[in-house]
């Protein structure tokens, strides 16, 4: 007995079958669309949280390293500033000295005072000076100190050092509030020439470049005993963002959602074994059955999933970071890839339970 | 119309079902009777092409003849109408949708189930499903219709209606083979082939 079911007839039959069982079809499509939508939301929520923590770590200076010579020899300040040209380095600046001073009007108060190269301002107050390259000059005061003493650019500030010598500072700039450390908001930085000798070089890198950068730093100052340590050790998270990304729960969501769809689709297919038995009696072969299953997969799983994913991504689009969006889209593609196993799994399930056996009561 | 079975042999593991079995069937209804396990369904499977005999062959009335198989469970697409279910036959034979609809309606009228055309299949009784299956076979234009226990578990009224439908298919020049245990069905057939378990030989 040969089958004359043309592809067009099979398509029409599949559509008519879906229309006849529209409640079931709509339910499956709704499950697929909702799963896809939920998958996107779950992924983007967890990824946004990780990204937020990551950004917070960066703001607090978790990727700032301190380079100094073990023997206490001074380093070349201009060499430290040059580190900014190394790929992966965000900012670099040298500390010449650290001390404390007291306002002349309130000598019981102590203020952190540093002398450093221009890049140091970019390391200490990234929001205020990140884009100003090497143009930072003069005396920079923290936002807290400026508020307390009413300091503005161009104002004068008088303070005495520990030896009682009075210094008059002409304020060059007021830094924006620093996320890195509260102490920086009450500090004064006296920016001096980049060519000065420095005691410590602070280097801020991109997180992804830490490993590569640590290799570059060795020998950068032509001193064999240079060491690089984390500057803000206490700000380091016990789990790095990379580890958090690798262990995030939502990465398993595509597997779970895809498996649900494969099992659901296979169960629905097996429940319709009687229908396929009739088609088999009429001569429909494996190829025809495959055509029906693929059309049903496209209409019931693929299109609703794509709609659900698209709606979620459009809804998230303006509100989330590009990285989060990319990762979420990747999770979505994984889900669609896994769900595409559904018609194959159904074919395998059917091959173990041939429709003609159904007619024989097996 | 003439269906010829020539010297077929069918064995399942250690069990011989047919050994050099031959038979010739003409147009009209033929009852195939025999005890359970005698090979009635196996014979229909061989004729339908679902089972290939180890030896021998089946000669259909015409090389392009279609064979339709009506099984006891009379499967239907439950959510589709009776007409849709009958149309599946002509559609499977490559007919266009329009032609399939015409053939199906004619076949349903011939079998006497035209009033059920718009009835959803899940509302049909067992007997009505069997008659729909007969209409589907007629609508397909099959030269050979095989019915495997078509009246099993049917009430007398439904049994008579199914036999009427098969009879109409037979009188329209088709070879209709009905595997049955039912004496009533046998009496409605023009000829009978009795098969014994582990049989060998010929029948006509």
Image (cartoon, grey):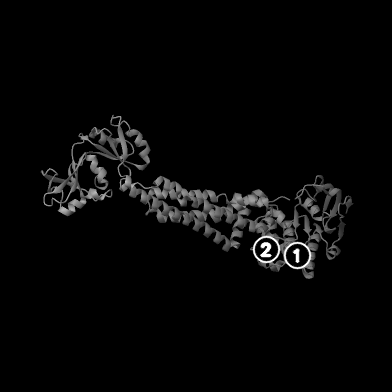
In the depicted structure, whether residue B189 falls above or below residue A119: below
Question: Where in the figure is residue B185, as x and y percent of width and height?
Answer: 83, 64
Q: Residue at x 58, y 56 (%)?
A: A264
User: At 53% across and 59% down in the image, what residue appears?
Assistant: A31
* In the rendered image, the vertical position of residue B61 relative to residue B191, given as above or below: above
- Residue A89, percent from left and from top: 31, 39
Q: Nearer the viewer, residue B25 or A209?
A: A209
Judge left or right: residue B43 versus residue A10: right
Image location of residue A161, percent across then percent down? 14, 44
Percent position (x, y) of residue A341? 57, 49
Q: Chain of mark 2?
A: B
Q: Secondary structure at mark 2?
A: helix
Residue A146 placement, left or right of B119:
left
The chain letter for the residue carrying disc 1 is: B
Between A192 and B36, the one nearer to me in the picture? A192
Residue B55: name its quadrant.
top right
Q: Is residue A107 left or right of residue A217?
A: left
Sequence-earlier tag: 1 or 2: 2
Q: Looking at the rendering, in which quadrant would you find the N terminus of chain B?
A: bottom right
Residue found 55% across the figure and 59% down from its top: A28
Residue farthest to the bottom? B157
Residue tagged 1 = B111
- Other residues around mark 1 within 10 Å, as few (<14) / some (14–19) / many (≥20): many
Would residue A125 be found to the left or right of residue B18 on screen?
left
As rendered, which of A92 and A308 lies closer to the eye?
A92
Kindly report the distance in space between the C-alpha atoms of the residues bearing marks 1 and 2. 13 Å
Q: At x 64% / y 58%, what residue is drawn? A: A272
> Is label 1 in contact with label 2 (beta carbons under 8 Å)?
no
Res B83 label: 2
Q: Count up the numbered dots.
A: 2
């Amino acid at each position: 007995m040969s089958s004359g079911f043309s592809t067009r007839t099979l398509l029409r039959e599949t559509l008519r079958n879906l229309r006849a069982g529209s409640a079931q079809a709509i339910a499956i499509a709704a499950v697929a669309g909702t799963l896809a939508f939920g998958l996107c939301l779950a992924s983007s929520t967890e990824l946004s949280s990780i990204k937020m923590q990551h950004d917070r770590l960066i703001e607090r200076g978790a990727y700032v390293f301190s380079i100094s010579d073990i023997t206490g020899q001074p380093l070349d300040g201009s060499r430290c500033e040059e580190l900014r040209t190394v790929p992966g380095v965000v900012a670099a600046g040298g500390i010449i000295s650290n001390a404390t001073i007291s306002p002349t009007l309130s000598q019981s108060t102590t203020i952190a005072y540093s002398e450093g190269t221009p890049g140091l301002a970019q390391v200490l107050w990234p929001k205020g000076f990140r884009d100003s390259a090497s143009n930072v000059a003069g005396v920079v005061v923290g936002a807290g100190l400026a508020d307390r003493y009413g300091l503005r650019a161009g104002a004068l500030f008088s303070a005495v050092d520990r030896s009682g010598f009075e210094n008059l500072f002409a304020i060059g700039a007021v830094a924006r509030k620093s996320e890195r450390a509260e102490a920086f908001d009450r500090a004064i930085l006296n920016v001096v020439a980049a060519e000065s000798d420095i005691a410590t070089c602070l280097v801020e890198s991109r997180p992804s470049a830490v490993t590569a950068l640590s290799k570059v730093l060795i020998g950068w100052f032509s001193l064999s005993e240079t060491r690089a340590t984390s500057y803000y050790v206490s700000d380091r998270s016990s789990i790095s963002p990379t580890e958090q990304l690798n262990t995030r729960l939502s990465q398993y969501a595509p597997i779970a959602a895809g498996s649900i769809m494969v099992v659901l689709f296979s169960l629905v297919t097996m429940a319709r074994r009687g229908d396929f038995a009739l088609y088999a009696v009429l001569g429909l072969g494996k190829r025809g059955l495959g055509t029906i299953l693929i059309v049903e997969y496209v209409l019931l799983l693929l299109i609703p999933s794509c709609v659900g994913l698209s709606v979620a991504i459009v809804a998230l689009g303006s509100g989330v970071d590009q990285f989060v969006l990319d990762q979420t889209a990747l999770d979505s593609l994984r889900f669609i890839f896994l769900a595409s196993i559904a018609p194959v799994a159904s074919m395998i399930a059917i091959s173990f339970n041939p429709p003609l056996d159904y007619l024989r009561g097996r | 119309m003439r269906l010829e079975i020539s010297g077929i042999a069918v064995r399942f593991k250690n069990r011989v079902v047919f050994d050099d079995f031959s038979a010739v069937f003409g147009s009209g209804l033929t009852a195939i009777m025999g005890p359970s396990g005698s090979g009635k369904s196996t014979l229909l499977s061989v004729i339908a092409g679902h089972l290939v005999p180890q030896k021998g062959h089946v000669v259909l009335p015409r090389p392009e003849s279609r064979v339709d198989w009506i099984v006891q469970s009379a499967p239907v697409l439950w959510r589709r109408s009776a007409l849709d279910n009958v149309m599946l036959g002509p559609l499977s034979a490559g007919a266009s949708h329009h032609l399939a609809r015409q053939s199906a309606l004619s076949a349903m009228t011939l079998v006497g189930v035209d009033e059920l055309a718009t009835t959803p299949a899940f509302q049909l009784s067992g007997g009505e499903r069997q008659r729909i299956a007969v209409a589907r076979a007629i609508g397909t234009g099959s030269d050979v219709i095989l019915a495997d226990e078509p009246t099993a578990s049917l009430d007398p009224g439904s049994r008579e209606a199914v036999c009427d439908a098969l009879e109409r298919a037979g009188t329209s020049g088709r070879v209709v083979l009905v595997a049955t245990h039912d004496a009533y069905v046998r009496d409605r057939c023009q000829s009978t082939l009795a098969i014994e378990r582990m049989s060998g030989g010929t029948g006509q």
